[in-house]
């Protein structure tokens, strides 16, 4: 089964999270779930992190953006990343997470 471009981004993010011994999961939204939840929900050294992944020029929906802003406002770290922002995400993780809410937009074009 071929890997989609967005799955490749998710896999790269998970590899970085694993390197930092983070707890994470990918919520499945369905008829009974909450829509707009980030693709990856993580806890990194006690800090809540919501990560929305995109491929290419993909942009978050209004609901995804609303959820990311809610994460930031309540003290968590909200990350938006595509394949061109993976290295920046790795550098951000290596540098250490802030202990207060932050929105990190790593959507980049090549």
Image (cartoon, helix red, strand yellow):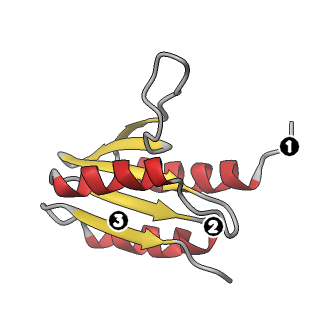
**Category of crowding for the residue at label 1, using alpha-carbon neighbours closer than 10 angstroms: few (below 14), some (14–19), many (at least 20):** few
Question: At x 35% / y 43%, what residue is drawn?
Answer: 42
Q: Where is residue 68 in the image (x, y as percent from the top left)?
A: 35, 53
Q: Quadrant of residue 33?
A: top left
CA–CA distance in space, label 3 to label 1: 28 Å
Q: Name the residue under label 1.
A: 2
Foreground mark, 2 or 3?
2
> Quick one: label 3 or label 1, which is nearer the N terminus?
1
Taking 71 as reference, is 89 left or right?
right
Foreground mark, 3 or 1?
1
Badge 1 marks a residue whose secondary structure is loop
> Quick one: label 2 or label 3, which is nearer the N terminus?
2
Q: Which one is nearer the viewer's eye here, 2 or 100?
A: 100
Q: Position of residue 23 (x, y in %)?
A: 34, 38
Q: Name the residue under label 3.
A: 93
Taking 87 as reference, is 50 left or right?
left
Badge 2 marks a residue whose secondary structure is helix
**Image quadrant in which the C terminus is located:** bottom right
Q: Where is residue 13 in the image (x, y as percent from the top left)?
A: 52, 55
Residue found at the very far top of the displayed protein: 32
């Amino acid at each position: 089964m071929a890997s989609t471009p967005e799955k490749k981004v998710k896999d790269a993010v998970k590899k970085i999270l694993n390197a930092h011994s983070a707890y994470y999961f990918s919520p499945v939204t369905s008829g009974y779930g909450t829509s707009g939840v980030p693709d990856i929900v993580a806890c990194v050294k006690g800090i809540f992190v919501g990560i929305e992944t995109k491929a290419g020029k993909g942009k978050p929906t209004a609901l995804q953006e609303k959820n990311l802003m809610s994460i930031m406002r309540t003290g968590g770290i909200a990350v938006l990343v595509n394949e061109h922002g993976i290295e920046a995400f790795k550098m951000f993780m290596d540098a250490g997470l802030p202990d207060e809410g932050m929105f990190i937009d790593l959507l980049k074009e090549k």
